[in-house]
Image (cartoon, grey):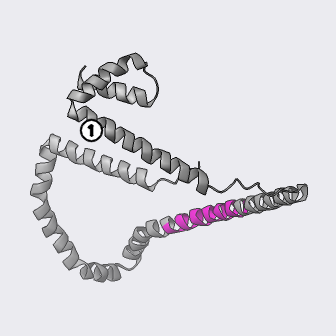
Amino acid sequence: MRCRDAKEWLSAQHDDERESSQSGALQEHLLHCASCRTFAQEQRRFDAMLGSLNKRVTTTTPPLVRPASISTDQIMRAIQQKKQITSQLEDLRQQQKIRVARMRTVGAVSAALGLLTLSSIPLLFLIVAIIQTDLALKTLSLFNGVIDEGIVLGEYIQPGLTLVTRDNLLLSGLAFAVVVMMGMWLRLMRAPQEA
């Protein structure tokens, strides 16, 4: 008998699954194999520890406690409380919807006024330039240094822009990177979904 078979027979004897007819061959193998003898001793020691543990658990486990009875009045009060809480939550949801609707209206009006104000600035400057020419020239002279710096900056940026626009692969990669980053940003900024 091989060691693997002997260990299987020992485990099966432990579970009382094997016939006692094979126990003779097993006993003969155990006489000659020290490894299997050690395995059998460890198994007996383990069984003894489990038996003592089971005895301790059964003696120290308290008896089951019967739950206290719940009256019908207590159940009805709990149902009423749940209904009240549900109605309060529904009221809060309605109030929140009303606030959001108001904020949308205020936000739309504010955006329209801001856009109107920003778009009227160039028109206002054009009117001032037509009516008060000398005032427009004084205003432009204030921006003279800024305009010169913008021209110099444009001259420095032009070789880089030429490189980017000349190499279509680089421009396509840059556009792809921007699109991917915007997609990731939109994914991260989306509203959480309710379960």
Q: Residue at x 31, y 25 (%)?
A: 27
Q: Residue at x 36, y 29 (%)?
A: 10
The residue sitting at the right extreme is 73
Residue 40 spot, x, y in % from top left? 32, 35
Front one among 129 and 160? 160
Residue 95 spot, x, y in % from top left? 72, 64
- 101 drawn magenta: yes
> Crowding at label 1, few (<14), some or many (≥20) Cα neighbours within 10 Å?
few
Q: Main secondary structure of the magenta part?
A: helix
Which residue in the structure is indicated by mark 1? Answer: 38
Front one among 3 and 137? 3
User: What secondary structure is marked by label 1?
Assistant: helix
Point out the stretch of residues depicted in magenta: 94-114
* Vertical position of residue 37 compared to residue 130: above or below: above
Residue 26 spot, x, y in % from top left? 31, 23
Residue 43 spot, x, y in % from top left? 36, 38
